[in-house]
Image: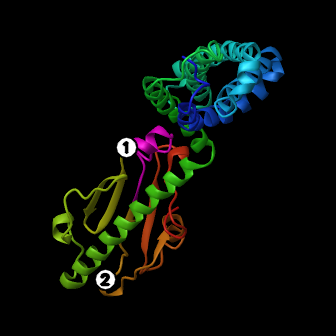
Amino acid sequence: MNLYAGPRRWGLFVLLAPCVLATDAVLLAWSLLGLLLFVPGVLGLAGLAGLLLGWTGLAAPGFVRRHRVLVGALLVAGLCAAVLGMILGWSAHSASGHDLAYLVGLGGTSLGYAAIAGFFLAGVARAHEDARAPARGTLALAAVLALATALLPVGVLLFVSGLPKVLRQMQGEEGMRMAREAQQAVMRYALAHGVAPKDNASAGLPEPDAGRYVRNLRIADGRIEVAFGAEMVSSLFLASAEGAGFTLEPPAGTPASWRWQTVPAQESDRAAAEPTTHWRCKAHVAALDHAPIYPRGWCN
């Protein structure tokens, strides 16, 4: 089988583009860091060059045919560096248990590199004129390989580009939106009956009220308690708000004097001796790194 012959090589070029580029982007930083130890960095950079040459050779097969030995040697050097990366990644996973910690990402991406490099090595070994063009089964194998090896490096790139912060913002916004709806229900009930509702049913809300990120929203004597739960994507990117939450406490005055404004709890605590018409919001976080990001002016 000759990967570098026939029109189907263009299909391979397109299919393998995401995994090759994402893998090179993630491992480039680690290879440069490896230059501090010289040999791992040199092997890593050589392997990344070999991967790019093997992939771009699908568009320009003449180069690979003329320099099969060079491309193959670069890919083998990269496999040596990938073994080191997998060892580091496995050690980090055993220590941290996180799926997308930086060193774990190195290990998983190194494993993906080894799979892609092996695929190209098999093709480079037969990149001569008389070998037959890739069959349809080769395209199917490339599609599976591309999907399997692109997921982790793309995830690592999203992780370092700030996706966890966006996910925490989304969790905070969902919690605040649901709390605002519950606040409206509480105020309507309080104005109609003169007292705050005792529970969700009294306020006309489901029991329990939940969303994508909010595990439970509960009303207790007018107080609105929001608790966040686990969600697959945010948990994968170490941004889960599970265990965190916040409480909205109604004003101390009569319902007729209540206002919609909400202030952070510590601000209203400083004025605890004075009557207040504002709701108080107090955040409860299990861990600072995993805390939701609340809209400004809502919670402490």
State the image coordinates of residue 207 (x, y, percent, origin top left).
Answer: 19, 58
Magenta segment range? 231-246
Q: Which of 53 and 2 is in front in this view?
A: 2
State the image coordinates of residue 264 (x, y, percent, origin top left).
Answer: 50, 67
Which residue, given by chain and number where applicable, does mark 1 sit on?
Answer: 230
Which residue, given by chain and number where applicable, does mark 2 sit on?
Answer: 254
Tell me, yes or no, if residue 49 can be seen here.
no
From the viewer's perspective, tell me whether residue 194 is left or right of residue 15.
left
Instruction: Say whether residue 296 is magenta.
Output: no
Q: Which residue is drawn at 71% across and 20% down?
A: 65
Of the numbered discs 1 and 2, the one sitting upstream in the chain is 1
From the viewer's perspective, tell me whether residue 135 is left or right of residue 196.
right
Is label 1 in a helix, a strand or a loop?
loop
The answer to whether 130 is drawn above or below residue 139 in the figure is above
Amino acid carrying mark 2 in the image = Thr
Q: Nearer the viewer, residue 95 or 69?
A: 69
Badge 2, how many Cα within 10 Å: few under 14, some, many 20+? some
Amino acid carrying mark 1 in the image = Ala
Measure how far apart labels 1 and 2 are at the Cα level. Answer: 37 Å
Is label 2 in a helix, a strand or a loop?
loop
The circle on residue 271 is none
